[in-house]
Amino acid sequence: MYDKQIFADNLMHYMKANNETQIDVAKLIGVSKSNVSAYIKGEQIPRMDVVDTKKAGSITPPACPFRE
């Protein structure tokens, strides 16, 4: 099982890196702002069928400092 806090930390990291708000993410994946808030607080994890590759593909992860 995936740890909710790991997901929350990763979501916040990528939101900050891409200057995305909770509302932006909610619209992107088609959920309410309160759902995104629960994801950020580590209270819930979205079902992976909600976060499909088309929707998630529009968020670009920042460059990894460990890659060359």
Image: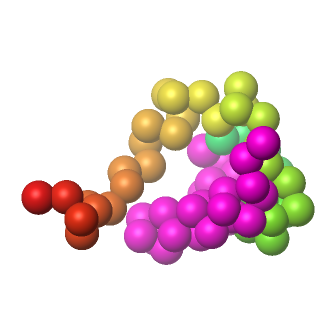
Q: What range of the chain is rendered magenta?
A: 1-28
Left/right of residue 56 with respect to residue 36 in the rendered view = left
Query: Looking at this view, is 39 or 5 the one in front?
Result: 5
Q: Residue at x 79, y 49 (%)?
A: 45
Quadrant in the picture for residue 6: bottom right
- Residue 5 appears at what percent x and percent y? 74, 65
Left/right of residue 40 with respect to residue 19 in the rendered view = right
Q: Is residue 2 magenta?
A: yes
Query: Looking at this view, is 16 or 44 the one in front?
Result: 44
Total numbered labels placed on residues in the image: 0
Q: Where is 5 relative to 46, above or below?
A: below
Q: Residue at x 54, y 35 (%)?
A: 55
Q: Is residue 41 magenta?
A: no
Left/right of residue 17 with respect to residue 33 in the rendered view = left
| Magenta stretch secondary structure, dominant | helix
Left/right of residue 24 with respect to residue 26 in the rendered view = left
- Residue 16 appears at what percent x and percent y? 49, 73
Quadrant in the picture for residue 61: bottom left
Q: Where is 7 relative to 55, above or below?
A: below
- Residue 24 appears at what percent x and percent y? 60, 58
Image quadrant in which the N terminus is located: top right
Residue 35 in view:
no
Residue 45 in view:
yes
Q: Where is 60 relative to 55, above or below?
A: below
Q: Residue furthest front?
A: 1
Q: Residue at x 67, y 57 (%)?
A: 7
Image quadrant in which the C terminus is located: bottom left
Q: Residue at x 44, y 49 (%)?
A: 59
- Residue 57 appears at what percent x and percent y? 44, 37
